[in-house]
Amino acid sequence: MKQKDRTVHNGRHSTEIQPYGTVIDRAISLDDRVRSSACEKLNQILADTITLRDMYKKHHWQVTGPTFYQLHLLFDKHFGEQVELVDELAERIQTLGGVAIAMAHDVAETTRIERPPRGRENPNTQLFRLLQAHEQIIAETREAADWAGKAGDQGTNDLLISNVLRTNELQVWFITEQFTAVGVEGRESEEAAEAAGSGHRRGHNH
Ligand SMILES: [Fe+2]
């Protein structure tokens, strides 16, 4: 077999480091160029998923306000589900003969998710930030899954659709409901204040 730039052959028998961005042989009947591209796409999604996972823990710790307890619990539940996705993505990369990104400084250099401040943000901002991160991951997951299906890497396609995409879509639903609850409550309070001020009766009550 011809040596290719991004392929390290017999890497598993070598005592040397397998460079990041390379793939070693795997007897899974999948071209090394496909495995290499798949690993590159998976590592981007992995870096973003690790970032979202950590953002959930940050928000779990720092959340405040009247919805503290339900958000505190929900953020940790989603954190746990993202932990599982991180492991599945990383192990898919290794399965394909690649090297999974792992350490915080490497993840920080790779992720496309906007860096949140160290300081504590209010719940609305926390929820908005989570939705943005989810949508980023969902978009790149759909694109990568579509590519993997066409390239013949059905295993990666299945992981991305069945696990990554579905989990993120479901979490967006739950986060959106929290976001809506806080937002609508705020608007309703304003409407109520206006209605009280002008003497108009509100059409409905909650
Ligand atoms: Fe906790």
Image (tube, grey):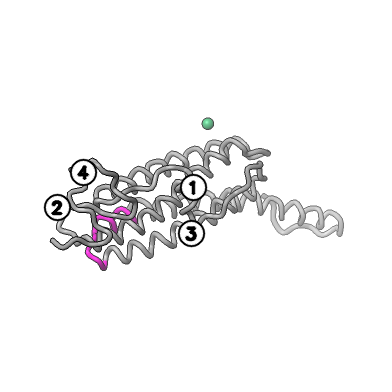
What number is the disc on residue 14?
4
Instruction: Check disc 2 and report its element: helix, strand or loop.
Output: loop
What number is the disc on residue 136?
3
* Callout 2 amino acid: Ala
Q: CA distance from mark 2 to mark 1?
A: 32 Å
Q: Which residue range is magenta in the image?
A: 150-161
Front residue of this view, candidates 100 and 70: 100
Q: CA distance from mark 4 to mark 1?
A: 32 Å
For residue 57, side relative to residue 94 (left or right): right
Instruction: Check disc 1 and report its element: helix, strand or loop.
Output: helix
Mark 2, residue position:
27
Residue 27 falls within the magenta-colored stretch:
no
Q: Earlier in the sequence, mark 2 or mark 3?
A: 2
Residues at marks 4 and 3 touching, judged by CB atoms closer than 8 Å: no
What number is the disc on residue 8?
none
Residues at marks 4 and 2 touching, judged by CB atoms closer than 8 Å: no
* Residue at the (49%, 52%) spot, across then down: 109
Q: Is residue 83 above or below residue 110?
A: above
Front residue of this view, candidates 41 and 52: 41
Where residue 128 appears, as percent x and y from the top left, is 59, 53
Mark 1, residue position:
51
Residue 161 visible here: no
Q: Earlier in the sequence, mark 4 or mark 2?
A: 4
Where residue 183 appears, as percent x and y from the top left, is 66, 53
Name the residue furthest front: 16
Q: CA distance from mark 4 to mark 2?
A: 17 Å
* Predominant SS along the magenta part: helix
Instruction: Check disc 4 and report its element: helix, strand or loop.
Output: loop
* Callout 1 amino acid: Thr
The label nearer to you, 4 versus 3, is 4
For residue 20, side relative to residue 9 (left or right): right
Where residue 82 appears, as percent x and y from the top left, is 43, 44
